[in-house]
Image (spheres, grey):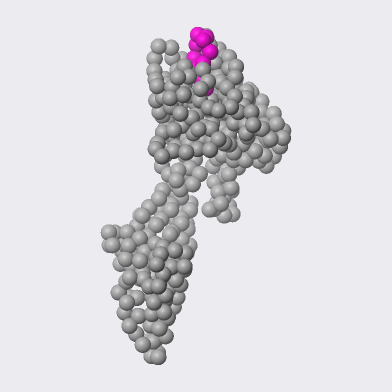
Amino acid sequence: MPRFIHLADLHIGTGFPHLEGQKRKNRQNDLLNALTRVADFALEEENRIDALWIVGDLFDCLNPEEALVDRVIDQFVRLAEGGKESFIVPGSHDPSVYPDSVYRIRTFPGCTLLNSPNMGEPVERIYHDVPFYFYGMEYHPILTKKPYDEFKAKNLPGFHVALIHGSLKVAVPWKADDTYMPLSPKGLGASGMNYLALGHYHNCSRYKVGNIDAVYPGTLEGLNFEEKGDRFLVIAEMEKGKDNKIIKHLWNKKNINKLKIDLLRDNIEEVRDIINYLRSYADKNLLMDVVITGPSEFTIDAGYIEKLLDNFFFYLKIHDESDFISSETVAGVSRERSVRGLFTRKILNHLDKIQDKNSREAQLLKDALKMTLPHLMVGESDEV
């Protein structure tokens, strides 16, 4: 039975702005290696892959570095030499409509580019004696016509597959501008397709529009802290008279996690407790985003903890949102007839006059007290 790899949103070349130096390069290589492993998988005879679909945002920009493109093309050469064709739809990050687009400048061996501004005539291929018709379109700011989801499958025997980098309406409220091609379930459900290969949403998900499978494969590696959890290589297996079979293979080499530490709930009484708590999650393939909340009787130096635990994680970021201002420590200092007491009272009095306690001004005052008071707490304080 025909089996296809469904990819989208690889975003090869993304900058990973939260990372620096070698870690940024390592993470960028993770994306390239994810594609290399896809090619390895497709070329393994036992996996029985017939072709690959790449539904938008193969690259993170329309004109990536030449050396980067060379490494990607190497994989398509391997696939082509192994008899595996790839179908590519440009996305919102790597559009082909501009003269300097990588798809206009470079040749991708073994790849069929589906970049018509509107859903036109399909490309026909035969797999296991079964005809397949592949429809694809790319958003063009002038030529693409609304609505984007009222195309129809041709009245031809075989399987009909539409490849679209767009935004399926799956939640309320919902809004997507034209660049991301808003798609309605009603329109797609009436298309007569056998499979809707989608791209743009970064989490792996499968929907039913009418009786048609609409599938987002998601990213192969999480690109930011909203893409935590497992990432998958998605295989679509299609057989006449049977429901489509969607197979997911765990694919990401690094994991992303978001952790919330509540100082009260988690019985954190000092900085050492935070350090020990985080060490219990230690994993050099983990990117961890930590938010610390709750009332605190001690100050937290997030940068110090990040540096101390740097070798325990691939990346660690700590956001200190704990409430030090309301602590007994601050209340006690504010009653002192001392320099630090005077400083603390001035900060607290200024805070009382600010109506919006979440404003930037209020946050700056809170941060000033958090950062300064520990230094003023060293030794005895002279009375004033």
Q: Residue at x 51, y 10 (%)?
A: 155
Q: Is residue 380 visible?
A: yes
Determine which quarter of the picture holds residue 209: top left
Q: In the image, 112: left or right of 132?
A: right
Residue range in magenta is: 153-162
Quadrant location of the C terminus in the rendered image: bottom left
Determine which quarter of the picture holds residue 118: top right
Q: Position of residue 81 (x, y in %)?
A: 63, 22
| Residue 157 falls within the magenta-colored stretch | yes
Q: Residue at x 57, y 54 (%)?
A: 20
Seen from the viewer's position, the closer of residues 355 and 265 is: 355
| Residue 264 falls within the magenta-colored stretch | no
Q: Position of residue 176 (x, y in %)?
A: 50, 38
Q: Main secondary structure of the magenta part?
A: loop
Seen from the viewer's position, the closer of residues 244 and 83 is: 244
Q: Position of residue 262 (x, y in %)?
A: 32, 59
- All told, the count of numbered labels is 0
Q: Is residue 3 visible?
A: no
Q: Position of residue 1 (x, y in %)?
A: 46, 15
Seen from the viewer's position, the closer of residues 278 and 130 is: 130
